[in-house]
């Protein structure tokens, strides 16, 4: 991460939910929620990054929040979140702020709305939203030792795969999630056991996995270990999705939106953007605000409803400059009836002085006063094109200033949208960074 202004050093925790290849949960009503966020089954993986300056002000991937999910149908209210789901705690403690993120060239930027054409105006949004993304393949978080049925400790995947790889297939069998990966490995090994009952050559008991590393397809042979429960393990911690809370920055008259003002990291020590094949926005209900203070950034908590009734939009791009996609028609009509359509400011029009931030952090959309204290029109880190200070006593009293979950809050100056909030200073929650709007567009 390139240094910018160089004033506030932070330690960032990236929380990612992980699971080994045998899952013990029997709850099938919504696999992307119960498999991803049941801490009693999966546990929490923590990684640290000490190279960043300022912490992302988004709740991804670690917003403490209660998550409800329905069966994918239009379930009725049941007191557990309004969509027929069961509330569960994400339990993640901080957002992902990679120390060395992937470059924009690693990802297609088709989701950006301008494609090199000048955008005259957009609706400023500022609404909080639940964000869900599913990985392309199964993301490797780490490798580990496992103990075989004879009590011997081995690390089958050591130096075969590494953190940040995406497993695509096992012996040619495509795997899209953790369950499919576990099933593929065990099916293949059981078939081998049945057809080679008299053979004792363990070296042949391998599976071939294909995976992506830095966009390049690679392969490796791994010898799974049978543990005392009779199942086979490769000693790899994996995950296949990510969820959290963020803020929609803007949308166009046809419903194309941009949010966050920075990318969503994969939550691992690799420091890469999440390589996702699909994603969605969902409505959320704000339930609490943890005020920020010097040394401890604040955060918002809420209930996110994963279900058809609560679907807001679809994601199609995760880049360093933000996430992009299409709002559903119902939400577009509802939002546009309430929000203000602003001209887009060129970078040269942004100046130090008073500005306003639009946010739903109080439970309703409001404007809060800011001071733009510095503008770097040639910033090498585009997520930090401007430095800002919260001057509104209402926001300081409510949250201490900028908190995690508010990344993407639009910034207005001189009647134009000029950018979005992206970072909070760890040592001073009233200060932070923002991205210029023309970078996001």
Image (cartoon, rainbow, N blue to C red):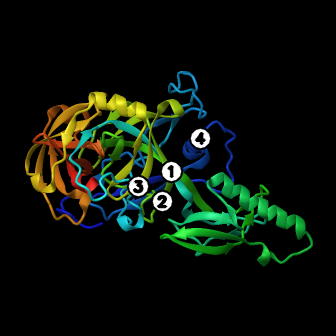
Q: Is residue 127 visible?
A: yes
- The mark that comes first in sequence, 1 or 4, is 4
For residue 242, above or below residue 192: above
The answer to which quarter of the image holds residue 33 is top right
- Label ID, residue 275: 2
- Residue 23: x, y in percent? 67, 49
Whether tag 2 and tag 4 are in contact, CB under 8 A, the answer is no
State the count of labels: 4
Local secondary structure at mark 3: strand
Whether tag 3 and tag 4 are in contact, CB under 8 A, the answer is no
Compute the Cα span from label 1 to label 4.
Answer: 18 Å
Q: Which residue is mark 4?
A: 34
Q: Which residue is mark 1?
A: 278
For residue 281, above or below residue 97: above
Whether tag 2 and tag 1 are in contact, CB under 8 A, the answer is no
Local secondary structure at mark 1: strand
Q: Nearer the viewer, residue 113 or 8?
A: 113
- Residue 326: x, y in percent? 41, 43
Binning the other alpha carbons within 10 Å of mark 1 as few (below 14), some (14 to 19) or many (20 upward) gives some
- Label ID, residue 318: 3
The mark closer to the camera, 1 or 4, is 1
Relative to 264, is 150 on the left or the right? right
Local secondary structure at mark 4: helix
């Amino acid at each position: 991460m390139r240094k910018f202004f160089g004033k506030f050093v932070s330690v960032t925790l990236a929380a990612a939910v992980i699971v080994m290849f045998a899952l013990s949960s029997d709850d099938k009503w919504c696999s992307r929620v119960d498999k991803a966020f049941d801490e009693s089954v999966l546990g929490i993986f923590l990684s640290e990054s000490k190279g960043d300056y300022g912490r992302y002000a988004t709740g991804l991937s670690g917003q403490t929040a209660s998550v409800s999910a329905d069966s994918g149908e239009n379930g009725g209210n049941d007191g557990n979140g309004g969509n027929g789901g069961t509330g569960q705690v994400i339990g993640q403690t901080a957002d992902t702020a990679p120390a060395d993120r992937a470059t924009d060239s690693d990802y297609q930027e088709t989701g950006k709305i301008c494609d090199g054409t000048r955008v005259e105006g957009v609706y400023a949004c500022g609404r909080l939203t639940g964000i869900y993304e599913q990985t392309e393949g199964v993301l490797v978080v780490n490798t580990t030792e496992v103990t075989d049925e004879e009590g011997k400790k081995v690390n089958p995947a050591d130096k075969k795969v590494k953190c940040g790889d995406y497993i695509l297939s096992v012996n040619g069998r495509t795997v899209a999630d953790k369950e499919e990966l576990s099933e593929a490995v065990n099916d293949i090994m059981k078939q081998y056991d049945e057809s080679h009952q008299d053979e004792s050559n363990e070296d042949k008991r391998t599976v071939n996995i294909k995976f992506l590393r830095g966009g390049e397809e690679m392969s490796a042979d791994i010898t799974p270990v049978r543990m005392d429960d009779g199942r086979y393990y490769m000693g790899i911690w994996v995950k296949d999705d990510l969820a959290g809370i963020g803020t929609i920055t803007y949308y166009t008259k046809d419903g194309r939106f941009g949010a966050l003002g920075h990318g969503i990291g994969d939550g691992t020590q690799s420091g890469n953007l999440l390589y996702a094949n699909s994603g969605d926005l969902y409505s959320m209900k704000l339930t609490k605000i943890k005020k920020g203070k010097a040394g401890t950034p604040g955060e918002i908590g809420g209930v996110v409803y994963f279900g058809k009734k609560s679907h807001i939009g679809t994601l199609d791009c995760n880049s360093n400059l933000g996430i992009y996609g299409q709002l559903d028609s119902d939400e577009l009509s509802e939002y546009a009836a309430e929000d203000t359509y602003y001209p887009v400011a060129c970078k040269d029009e942004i100046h130090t002085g008073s500005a306003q931030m639009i946010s739903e952090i109080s439970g309703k959309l409001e404007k809060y006063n800011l001071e733009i204290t510095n503008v770097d029109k040639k910033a090498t880190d585009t997520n930090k094109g401007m430095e800002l200070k919260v001057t509104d006593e209402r926001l300081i009293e409510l949250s201490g200033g900028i908190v995690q979950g508010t990344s993407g809050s639009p910034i207005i100056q001189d009647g134009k949208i000029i950018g979005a909030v992206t970072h909070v200073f760890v040592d001073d929650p009233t200060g932070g960074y923002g991205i210029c709007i023309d970078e996001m567009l």
